Image (cartoon, helix red, strand yellow):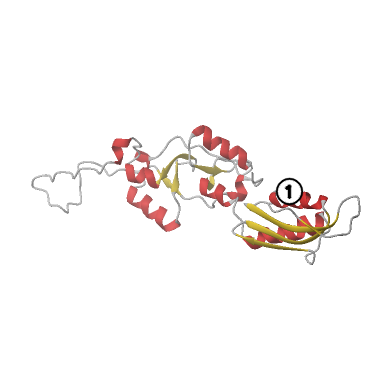
Amino acid sequence: MHSGSVGELMSAPGVAVRRGTGLEEVAALIAEHRVHAVAVIDDEGHPVGVVSQRDLRYGGDRSPAARAPLPALPRTPGRAAGARHSSRAAPTAGDVMTSPAVTALPTWSLPEAVRTMERRRVKRLPVVDAGDQLVGFLSRSDILRSFLREDADVRAEITAEVLSDTLGIGPSQVRVTVTDGRVTLQGIVAHRDLLLVVDRLVRGVAGVVEVRNHLAYSTDAPSGRSAIQPAQPR
C-alpha cells in the first residue's frame, strides 16, 4: 500500500458550508469546485457533518424508498404558482448532512485512514488540523489515484533505481517499455540468477500491473558458462 500520509494525498482546501446553507447553494458549490461532498461546520469552524451529492439527491434518506421520485406537491388554493413564500422552510445542509463528521489528521498514514473509512462505513474524511479546523478532504478517489502513476514515471524508476542504482544494469543492457502499467523487459543480464531478482524488484514498483520478462542471460551463476541463454517465457 502507498506509504504517503493523508496530508500528501488529500484534496485541499476543503469546501465548507454552515448548517443553515440552502441546498441550492450547496449544489452550486459542489459543481463550482468539482467535488463530491462538502463539510458542514459550526460557528467555531469545526466539522459537524458532511453533505454529499447523494445526500442532495435523496434528502439525507438512504433507504430504498427514498430513491423513488418525489410526488408533486399540490398547489395551495389562492396562491400563484410562482409565489416567493412557502409555509414550509426550505431544507438546509443541516437537514440532510451525514453526522457526526468522521475526521482525519494530515499526519495519519494511508492505512490508518482506510481502516477508519471501513470501520465507520464512510466514503470520505474531512481532514482537520490540530485546532479541528478543516484543511482538506480525503476520498476514495484520492486513495485510488495514489496507486496510479504515469507510465513514464514507472519506467524512470525501474531504469534508474531498480536496474542502474540497485543492480548496476545500464540502459544499453536492458530496454524497458511501459504501457498502461504493463512492463516489458528486453535485453541481456550477466547471470541467470539476475532474472528472478530483476523480475521481483520490478513487480514491486508502484504502478506496475504486469511484467513481461523477455530477458536473456550470458552465463550461469556460478559456473561461468558463456553461452547466452534466453529466459523462460512468463
Q: Residue at x 86, y 52 (%)?
A: 220
Q: Residue at x 69, y 50 (%)?
A: 203
Q: Amino acid at mark 1?
A: Arg
Q: Secondary structure at mark 1?
A: helix
- Note whether residue 139 is visible: no
Q: Label 1, on which residue?
A: 200
- Depth check: 41 or 198 in front? 198
In the rendered image, the quadrant that contains the N terminus is top right
Classify residue 137 as left or right of residue 169. Answer: left
How many marks are shown on the rendered structure? 1
- Depth check: 50 or 21 in front? 50
Looking at this rendering, what residue extends furthest in the bottom direction? 172
| Residue 194 pos. (x, y %) | 81, 52
- Note whether residue 202 is visible: yes
| Residue 24 pos. (x, y %) | 33, 51
| Residue 58 pos. (x, y %) | 32, 42
